[in-house]
Image (cartoon, rainbow, N blue to C red):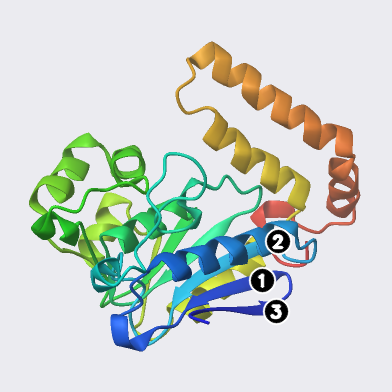
């Protein structure tokens, strides 16, 4: 198994571990990744997932050698993406913990995640530009939405490497941490997010994704509908009691 799962509830860590290929993803690995995220989605104890690449590399993309050996990624319009979970619409957040290369399909995996915690040595890039391999796991869709059209085209047309400093400036990265610390810091962030009332957190997250492509009036209605789901859950009543006890006042995020 190239894809490993470690559960430290409420955090669910999924690990790509293939030292020989710099965590490149072939067909079987893509299926393992999809299966791992489906397990996360249905695990009621797991509230936030972390996707991490072992051995100092996040993911170097699709395994081109495997394609020539008959173990290539599945290329279909329907079902899972070639890299695995990139077409999945999860109800819970995923944080990418990135060291070293997150390039080509590995970049697309990182873009699929909600947030990216990266190490100082992280490198992003559309390195598949060199070989005529297209972006088919959301790269041309998510990248411009995340960092803007001009910067996305810079990366997509040139294939050039983007380092951690530039990635943070562009909004491609959310946090930059010391080398060797991305998984630790991503799991810490995951626990912080998981500590919040989770119905509200999940519905607000889904509202963000759902409003893309809607006009302002439609988006406001969509947001209200997600908000109603949270209010109907009664979760805010517990939150109000917590506030009345003095916890969380004056912007304090401790003891909530």
Report crowding for label 3: few under 14, some 14 to 19, many 20 or more residues within 10 A (C-alpha): few
Crowd tier of the residue under label 1, counting other residues whose Cα lies within 10 Å: few below 14, some 14–19, many 20 or above: many
Q: What residue is rendered at 86% in x and 44% in y?
A: 235
Q: Secondary structure at mark 3?
A: strand
Residue identifier under label 1: 11
Which residue is depicted at the point 36% across and 81% down?
178
The quadrant in which residue 59 appears is bottom left
- Disc 3 to disc 1, how far (Cα)? 5 Å
Return the residue at label 3. Answer: 8
Quarter of the rendering occupied by the C terminus: bottom right
Badge 2 vs badge 1, beta-carbon distance below 8 Å: yes
Q: Earlier in the sequence, mark 2 or mark 1?
A: 1
**Identity of the residue drawn at 65% across and 69% down:** 191
Residue 144, percent across and down?
Answer: 29, 39
The furthest residue to the top = 217
Residue 8 place in picture, x, y as percent: 70, 79
Residue identified by numbered label 2: 47
Instruction: Label 1: state its secondary structure.
Output: strand
At a point 36% along the width and 77% down the height, the residue shown is 23
């Amino acid at each position: 198994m190239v894809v490993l799962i470690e559960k430290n509830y409420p955090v669910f860590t999924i690990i790509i571990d293939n030292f020989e290929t710099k965590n490149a993803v072939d067909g079987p690995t893509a299926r393992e990744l999809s299966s791992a995220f489906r397990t996360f989605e249905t695990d009621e104890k797991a509230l936030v997932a972390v996707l991490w690449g072992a051995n100092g590399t996040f993911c170097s993309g699709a395994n081109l050698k495997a394609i020539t050996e008959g173990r290539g990624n599945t290329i279909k319009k329907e079902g899972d993406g070639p890299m695995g979970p990139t077409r999945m619409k999860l109800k819970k957040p995923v944080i990418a913990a990135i060291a070293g290369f997150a390039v080509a399909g590995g970049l697309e995996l990182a873009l699929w995640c909600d947030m990216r915690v990266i190490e100082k040595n992280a490198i992003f890039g559309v390195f598949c530009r060199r070989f005529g391999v297209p972006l088919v796991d959301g790269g041309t869709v998510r990248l411009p939405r995340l960092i803007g059209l001009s910067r996305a085209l810079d990366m997509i047309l040139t294939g050039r490497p983007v380092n951690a400093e530039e990635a943070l400036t562009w909004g491609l990265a959310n946090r930059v941490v010391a080398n060797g610390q991305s998984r630790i810091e991503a799991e810490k962030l995951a626990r912080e997010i998981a500590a919040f009332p989770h119905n509200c957190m999940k519905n607000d997250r889904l509202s963000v994704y759902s409003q893309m492509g809607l006009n302002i009036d439609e988006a406001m209605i969509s947001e209200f509908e997600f908000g109603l789901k949270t209010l109907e859950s009664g979760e805010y009543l517990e939150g109000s009691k917590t506030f009345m006890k003095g916890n969380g006042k004056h912007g304090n995020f401790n003891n909530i």
